Image: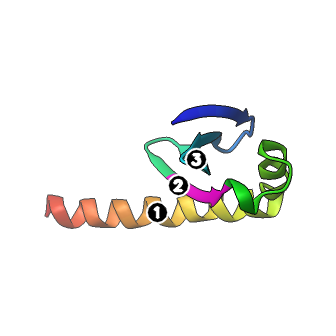
Amino acid sequence: MRIVAELPHPDCKISIFAMNQKFIIKFEQGTLEQSYKIAETDVIGGVNGVFELIDETFIKTVVDQFAVMRQSFFAAFSRYES
């Protein structure tokens, strides 16, 4: 797996990897991460097409999902500590 691009964003780190004819879009926020895989053949224009796919609406949805993930983890951790 090799990193082919990074997209700066204030709410999360966005990295694009290439591996086995797939692009992997990885979002990181603190200790949490989300990744999405898409076949290179499904994207027109290679990595530039991936940049077009990652629009602000998609990023907002990912950031909102991070909040849900964080709440789920904290709830599970609270049950664990009890």
Residues at discs 1 and 2 in contact (Cβ within 8 Å) = yes
Residues at discs 3 and 2 in contact (Cβ within 8 Å) = yes
Q: CA distance from mark 1 to mark 2?
A: 10 Å
Q: Residues within 10 Å of mark 2 (few under 14, many from 20)?
A: some
Q: Residues within 10 Å of mark 3 (few under 14, many from 20)?
A: some
- Hey, what amino acid is under mark 2? Gln
Residue at the spot of label 2 = 34
Q: Secondary structure at mark 2?
A: strand
Residue at the spot of label 3 = 26
**Left or right of 26 in this view: 53:** right
Residue 36 within the segment the image draws in magenta: yes
- Quadrant hosting residue 29: top right
Residue at the spot of label 1 = 69
Q: Which residues are magenta?
A: 34-39
**Left or right of 53 in this view: 61:** left
Q: Looking at the picture, how far across and down is residue 32, in whole percent? A: 46, 49
Seen in the picture, residue 44 relative to 30 is either above or below; the reply is: below
Looking at the image, which residue is at 17% across and 62% down? 80
Residue 79 within the segment the image draws in magenta: no
Figure label count: 3
Magenta stretch, main secondary structure class: strand
**Left or right of 15 in this view: 20:** left
Q: CA distance from mark 3 to mark 1?
A: 15 Å
Q: Residues within 10 Å of mark 1 (few under 14, many from 20)?
A: some
Between marks 3 and 1 in the image, the one whose residue lies nearer the viewer: 3
